[in-house]
Amino acid sequence: MPRAVYVLAVGIFAMVTSEFAVAGLMPQMAGGLGVSISQIGYLITAFAVAMAFGGPFLTVALLRARQKTALMVLFAVFLAGNVLAATATDYPVILVARVVTGIASQAFFGVALTLCVQLTRPEVRGRAIAAAMNGLMLGTLLGLPLATFVGEHLGWRAAFWAVSVLTVIAAACTLVGVPRPERAEAGRDFRAELAAFRNPRLWLALSTSTFVIGATFAAFSYFNPILTEVTGFADGTVPLLLVAYGAATVVGNHVVGRLADRHTVPVLWYGLLLNAVFLAGFALVADLAVPAVACLLGVGLVGVTMNPAMVTRVQRTGNARPLVNTVHSSFITLGVIIGSAVGGLAIDTWGLRAPLWLGAALALAGLGTLVPELRHRAAPAPAAPDGPGAPAAASDDPGAPAPASDGPGAPAPEARAVSASQPAE
């Protein structure tokens, strides 16, 4: 695996740590800015909305830049947003800061995943995406607790200064450790990028990702009150359980990364099915400590860890360029917004187990979006002409190796698809 992939993970870790920081610093920020806890909560919503709807526009603005150059610009914008947050004197200023960092974060995900694809061989791209996305998993596991620790001991502003320092370190590592790709990526225009979105199968793949993440975040957003008020754990125990959940996401991400290249759709199918089972099981046994924790860890193993398979499917259906990757990230963020918002409304009506049932329902809806893909894969291939020299039938599986008739040096099908959408210099 190229070293550059792990360097990109450091950048993603910085972005995710900033995203989650507010969640762990609500009381301190509310007191320091003289606002309510609910107003601080709106900062989380503002960040997510900025990611979902602002990120693609910033990506479009950077379409003609090389990917490495675009990353450095995004680091600069993200750093400016975090410095603005650290020095904010009132609520409107920090609200603007969170919008700026949200937009830059989303665009960074799209560009980083594109560069990750360019720097790796086709047959290991799922593993490479998983390695880069470990930045997301480690942000859940370590970023939030670290930001909370710094904020509690040094003040909430220090947490944003710490993220700023981490951003500078990540940018320096990227500048030194990430090479320029061999293929030039400049010169693409907006219309060329939009062409991929004419494919209805791409929209189906994007909707699957929304349901995968929506199902998980409907539950994850409310793990703390569920574990304390329903399961009965002490407040001090919940952070340890969330660390265990984060560790499960790291393990699951590694496994999915290994399988995503050759078994993309089956991984998503079984992942969604298991997630529905774990979420429904959690809802049923939430008042029993041991079964509840087992279901919690199960959600960690098969929830957000579907990211490598989700990204692989979207890139094969559309392309591996920044706009498709950024729009995909927006659909993922939309899942976060839907899951957390609707989960909160469900609690008001049906109680704390409701988000778990909602998550299970969203996972089942995600399975529905995979049915057309499974039917397409199961459809019989057209009959090949008889006789010597006839071409071999193409496989419906986008992860299958190239037919033998292509010759030992021919690229795999997905390599041809990506190179077709990314002209060489």
Image (tube, helix red, strand yellow):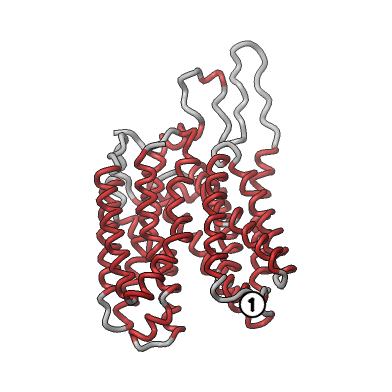
Residue 285 location, quadrant: bottom right
Q: Residues within 10 Å of mark 1 (few under 14, many from 20)?
A: some
Mark 1 lies on a secondary structure that is helix
Give the position of the C terminus as an image quadrant.
top left
Q: Is residue 182 above or below residue 138?
A: above
Judged from this view, the residue extending furthest toward the top is 388
Residue 184 against residue 140 in the figure, above or below: above
The quarter of the image holding the N terminus is top left
Q: Residue at x 49, y 49 (%)?
A: 198
- Residue 170 appears in the rendering: yes
* Residue that appears at 60% across and 39% down: 263
Residue nearest the observer in this picture, 343 or 192? 343
Total count of labels: 1
Instruction: Depth check: give the residue in front, 419 or 332.
Output: 332
Could you say where residue 219 lies in the image, as x and y percent from the top left?
Answer: 60, 68
Residue 53 visible in the current orientation: no
x%, y% of residue 247? 53, 55
130 to the left or right of 165 = right
Residue toward you, 142 or 259: 142
- Is 189 placed left or right of 289 in the picture? left
Residue 365 horizontal side relative to residue 326, left or right: right
Picture coordinates of residue 352 (x, y %)? 65, 77
Residues 259 and 149: in front is 149
Residue 88 on image: x %, y % = 27, 78
Residue at mark 1: 346
Q: Is residue 66 above or below residue 97?
A: above
Q: Which residue lies furthest to the right in this view?
A: 284
For the point 32% across and 35% down, the residue is 183
Q: Which amino acid does label 1 sit on?
A: Ala
Asked where in the image residue 320 lies, by quadrant, the reply is: top left
